[in-house]
Amino acid sequence: MKLILRLFLLVFPLSLAATPQGHEILIYQGDTMFIDYFPLEKLREQDISLWLKLNKLLPSKSSKCWRGYIGTWQIVNDSLFLIQIEKDIYDDDEIKEIDLGILFSKKQVTTNGVFASWYTETIQSNYGDFLDTNKDEMYMIYSGQFFCTINRGIVSNVKILMKSQSEIDAILKDRMIKEDTMAFIVTDEMPTFIFDSKLYKDVKDFIQKNIRCPNSENECQGIVFVTFVVEKDGSMSHLRVLRGHSPEFDKEALRVIALMKKWKPGKHNEKVVRVQYMLPIEFKIE
C-alpha cells in the first residue's frame, strides 16, 4: 500500500466572515469613491420589468457580487445619475458594459445618465487617500469621510470631513510599524518554497517524498492543520499545529514542514513582508 498525501496551500484564515460585496462607484466633483450602497437594487425590487431584464443579461453571478454588476453613479449639481453598468462576470467575446438604453427608456437616458428619481438614502463613504486597514474590525481607513442625503434622487447636505495632518501622520506611522512586524495572510506576491528541482517536482512532491506514516500503515489516516510564518529573509518561524489529529500525526507533520527551511519571501506593495501560511496535510492510504 502507498501513503498518499493530499496537500492544499491555503492563504486565508480558517474562519471566514460573509463574503464582502463588490462596491458601487460614486463620482463627486471629479473624485471617485467606492460605496456600499446599491441604488439600482432599490428599483429592481420595485420594477418587475427591470428585474427580468437584469436577470436575462446577468445569468452568472459570483458570491462577491450577488447582484451581478457594478454600477457607476455621479452627482451632477444636486442630482444623482446612473452613468454606467458593467457585468461582474462576462466571457471574452462579450461586451462588459450594459447599454443603459436596454434597461431604461430613451426619455430616461439623458446626457448626464439616468436620474435616480426612485432612490432615497443617507450615504456615508470613505473619501480621499487610503491610509490603512483595521484588520480586527475589517474596515479600511481613509483620509476623509463623505456624507450626503439623497431624497428621490436629489442630493443635499453634502459634507466632507478630513482627518487632520497629525491624525494622518499617526495612522501612517502605526501602519509602517505593523507592516514591519505583522504577518500578512494575503499578499500581492506570496512566498515560494525553494527546493532542488532535480529531486522534487513541486512542494507537494517534496512533502510526499519526506513524510512518513506515524502509525502502522493500516491506521494511517488523518488530517493535521499546520501554520507557520515565512520571514522577510526567507526563513521559517512560528511553526505550530493549528488543529491536530493525534500527538504522533502532529509530530510528523511538524517534522516534515520544518524541513522546508528556504523560501523566497512574499511581497506586498513591492515591499518584502512577513507572510503566514496555513497548510492542511491529509494522511491517507490508497
Image (spheres, grey):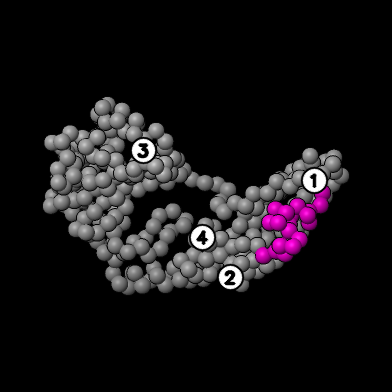
Quadrant of the snapshot with the N terminus: top right
Earlier along the polypeptide chain: callout 1 or callout 3? 1
Distance from Cα at disc 4 to Cα at disc 2: 13 Å
The amino acid pointed to by label 4 is Thr
Q: Residue at x 47, y 56 (%)?
A: 136
Instruction: Give neighbour class at mark 2: few <14, some 14-19, many 20+ (Cα, 10 Å).
Output: many
Earlier along the polypeptide chain: callout 3 or callout 4? 3
Which of the pair 211/140 is nearer the observer? 211
Picture coordinates of residue 283, whole percent (x, y): 75, 45
Give the residue at mark 1: 3
Check if mark 1's residue and mark 4's residue have beta carbons within 8 Å: no
Earlier along the polypeptide chain: callout 1 or callout 4? 1
The amino acid pointed to by label 3 is Arg
The answer to if 166 sits in the magenta stretch is no
Quadrant of the snapshot with the C terminus: top right
The amino acid pointed to by label 1 is Leu
Give the residue at mark 4: 187
Picture coordinates of residue 225, whole percent (x, y): 67, 50
Q: Residue at x 40, y 63 (%)?
A: 132
Earlier along the polypeptide chain: callout 2 or callout 3? 3
Question: What span is colored magenta in the figure?
Answer: 194-213
Instruction: Give neighbour class at mark 3: few <14, some 14-19, many 20+ (Cα, 10 Å).
Output: many
Check if mark 2's residue and mark 1's residue have beta carbons within 8 Å: no
Element type at marker 3?
Answer: loop
Element type at marker 2?
Answer: loop
Give the residue at mark 3: 67
Predominant SS along the magenta part: loop
Give the residue at mark 2: 232
The answer to if 205 sits in the magenta stretch is yes
Distance from Cα at disc 1 to Cα at disc 3: 45 Å
